[in-house]
Amino acid sequence: MADLTFNTTPGQTIDRNLLALYLNTGTAAAPEWHRIGKRVEDSSMEMDWGQETKTDIFGDVWTTQKTPVKTQTFDPCELDAGDPAQVMLWNLAIKDEDAAALCALDMLVAHLYVDVGASGAKFAVRNSACAISPTSLGGAGGGFLGMPLDVTFGGQRTVGSVVSADGEITFTPEGSGD
């Protein structure tokens, strides 16, 4: 894939809502993508590059780094019966305590500020085995029930594009057509 550019106005900052994370609540063959982060005010994807710096015997400093481990926290992530992603995660974590299933979740990161081709498709990356760890369940008295989430992106990383039509998200892997 050639280098891509942002589809926003030069000199204008990019709106945060144009970086979207989706959880597949369907199957790998028939995905149903639902956005994560409803009612969350601040969430950033953190990248740990495993950077190592050393000084050799000549006094020169050299730095290496690895493919990043990417994580993202969603807090407070207040529960909502109308959010299929939250309902699925609550069932896996609270009802079933299914740690294995929570480490094998299909997720999609959509960069809605980057066009791919002329069809209106946007750049996206699908990760086949992400881990989502609910870190607590509760909240302040008189408030709302929250279930903060820690996401670690993992599994096979597939670059491609997404389009949205009538609220449905469709992911197309790179090389499969646009």
Image (spheres, helix red, strand yellow):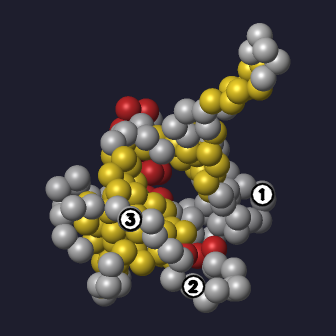
In-image side of 157 versus 143 (left or right): left
The mark that comes first in sequence, 3 or 1, is 3
The mark that comes first in sequence, 3 or 2, is 3
State the CA–CA distance, disc 1 to disc 2: 40 Å
In the foreground, 86 or 154: 154
Residue at 70% in and 85% down? 11
Check the picture and name the quadrant holding the N terminus.
bottom left
State the CA–CA distance, disc 3 to disc 1: 49 Å
The dot on residue 2 is 3
For disc 1, the marked residue is 140
161 over 57 or under it: above or below: below
In-image side of 77 versus 122 (left or right): right
Residue at 64% in and 79% down? 15
| Closer to the eye: label 3 or 2 | 3
Secondary structure at numbered mark 2:
loop
Amino acid type for the residue under numbered disc 3:
Ala
User: Residue 107, how many percent across, how many down?
Assistant: 40, 54
Secondary structure at numbered mark 3:
loop
In the foreground, 28 or 113: 113
Residue 60 occupies quadrant: top right
User: Residue 62, how many percent across, how many down?
Assistant: 71, 27
For disc 2, the marked residue is 8
